[in-house]
Image (tube, grey):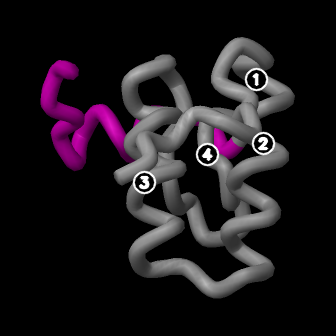
């Protein structure tokens, strides 16, 4: 994934963020959408997680979380 500089980030329209009001979690590429899901699961509230998941799924339906994707021990 290419590094997103602050200059590039400022140029992104609000529609390219999972939380546009806060301009948080850019989802302009599939890789950044995956990263947004990972980061919000670590640091976001339950409401934020739900919003980010919905935004990512809407933009990239192929990233929709499937039920059995986690490895079992």
Q: Is residue 71 left or right of residue 1?
A: right
Mark 4 lies on residue: 17
Q: Which label belongs to residue 38?
A: 3
Is 62 rendered above or below residue 64?
above
Relative depth, front residue between 48 and 21: 48
At label 1, counting other C-alpha atoms closer than 10 Å, the crowd grade (few under 14, some 14-19, many 20 or more) is some
User: Distance of mark 1 from mark 4, alpha carbons?
Assistant: 10 Å
The quarter holding residue 38 reads bottom left
Contact (Cβ within 8 Å) of mark 4 with mark 2: no
At label 3, counting other C-alpha atoms closer than 10 Å, the crowd grade (few under 14, some 14-19, many 20 or more) is few
At numbered mark 3, what does the secondary structure look like: helix, strand or loop?
Answer: helix
Contact (Cβ within 8 Å) of mark 2 with mark 1: yes
At label 4, counting other C-alpha atoms closer than 10 Å, the crowd grade (few under 14, some 14-19, many 20 or more) is many
Contact (Cβ within 8 Å) of mark 1 with mark 3: no
Q: At which x and y percent is residue 42?
A: 41, 74
Q: At which x and y percent is residue 40?
A: 51, 66
Q: Which label belongs to residue 59?
A: 1
Mark 2 lies on residue: 55
Q: Residue at x 21, y 21 (%)?
A: 1
Sequence-wise, the earlier of marks 1 and 3 is 3
At numbered mark 1, what does the secondary structure look like: helix, strand or loop?
Answer: helix
Q: Residue at x 29, y 33 (%)?
A: 8
Relative depth, front residue between 7 and 1: 1
Which numbered disc, 1 or 3, marks the residue closer to the eye?
A: 3
Q: Residue at x 72, y 82 (%)?
A: 46
Sequence-wise, the earlier of marks 4 and 2 is 4
Is 30 rendered above or below residue 19?
above
User: Distance of mark 4 from mark 2, alpha carbons?
Assistant: 8 Å
Question: Seen from this angle, which residue lies furthest top?
Answer: 62
Which numbered disc, 1 or 4, marks the residue closer to the eye?
A: 1
Magenta-tinted stretch: 1-14
Sequence-wise, the earlier of marks 4 and 3 is 4
């Amino acid at each position: 994934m290419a590094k997103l500089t602050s200059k590039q980030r400022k140029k992104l329209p609000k529609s390219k963020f999972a939380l546009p009001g806060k301009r948080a979690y850019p989802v302009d590429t599939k890789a950044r959408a995956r990263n947004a899901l990972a980061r919000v699961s670590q640091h976001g509230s339950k409401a934020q997680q739900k919003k980010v998941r919905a935004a990512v799924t809407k933009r990239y339906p192929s990233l929709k979380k499937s039920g059995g994707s986690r490895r079992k021990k």
